[in-house]
Image (tube, grey):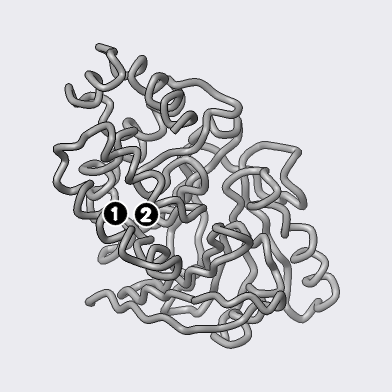
Amino acid sequence: METIYFTTSSFSFQRRSTSFQTTTMASMTVKKIPALKDNFMYLVVCNETRKAAVVDPVEPERVLEVVKEDGVQLNQLLTTHHHWDHAGGNEALYQKFRENPEWGELLVYGGNDDRIDRLTNRVGQDDTFEIGKLRVRCLSTPCHTTSHICYYIETDQDRVVFTGDTLFLAGCGRFFEGTPEQMYDALINKLSALPDDTKVYCGHEYSVQNLRFGNTVEPDNADTKTLLETAQAADLEGRRALVPSTIGQEKRTNVFMRVHEPSVQAFVGKSTPHETMQALRAAKDKF
């Protein structure tokens, strides 16, 4: 089934203009819900059962508005990591379910971390669970935080991954609680190993800044240059439309997934991928 994109303008309870961007696939539908300044929340729906999960619902009232409008059954919350702009809505959404027992139980998934509010299901590498008939596989990606989890969903027709603050469009998260070796493992050994057509749903809209950095590192990378021109030509809502990326696109344009490339190593004056990862992150932090 062909992927269908459409955008619906709406207003949040803060009266802030936003856009919902929906990807309708054969087996699932993903609705991207902008939040705060540049965050993304995601509603994931199993098309067959109409059961749904929400990823990082920092503004739960907005999520519940969408759930009501779409007529889906929400009972699962997927937390990528404990930072307030991702997990800060867990408590409020939990309380909403307590106030409305007819909604059923809210299951809260996340890494083994007491800093995640209302955590009911602690998950780690290769743990699985279902959203309706969609099978979710957990990828442990510590570095940005010690317990960061990415959520990968694969069906016969469709593949998506929710990467939180580990992998962004053309970038990666800061190494707040981990090491370059851990980020290398996350980006190269785990995420790069997913099929190239896997859609990448990240936690923030940072595309222009990331692509400018990438273009500085690899000025001869035609893919990066083209994507940067597209991002620079768009307003904020248009740049948000660049998400989802794909794993294949990230492998072509994301310098943090290209640490084996001689051109990337040469930019930071390093000769090994781990050293290159560390030096790249340090350079990006000052960019």
Q: Are marks 2 and 1 in contact (CB under 8 Å)?
A: yes
Residue labelled with disc 2 = 200
Q: Nearer the viewer, residue 81 or 223?
A: 223
- Residue in the image at 60% along x and 78% along y: 73
Residue 10, image x and y in percent?
56, 83
- Residue in the image at 46% along x and 84% along y: 8
Q: Amino acid at mark 1?
A: Thr
Residue labelled with disc 1 = 246
Left or right of residue 178: residue 113 = right
Residue 171, image x and y in percent?
39, 41
The quarter of the picture where residue 254 lies is top left
Secondary structure under tag 2 reads: strand
Residue 227, image x and y in percent?
25, 54
In the picture, the disc for residue 127 is none
Q: Amino acid at mark 2?
A: Val
Left or right of residue 245: residue 183 = right
Q: Nearer the viewer, residue 105 or 208?
A: 208
Q: Quadrant of the C terminus?
A: top left
For the residue carrying disc 1, how many other residues have a C-alpha within 10 Å: few (<14), some (14-19), or many (20+)?
Answer: many
**Taking 94 as reference, is 184 above or below it?**
above
Q: Quadrant of the N terminus?
A: bottom left
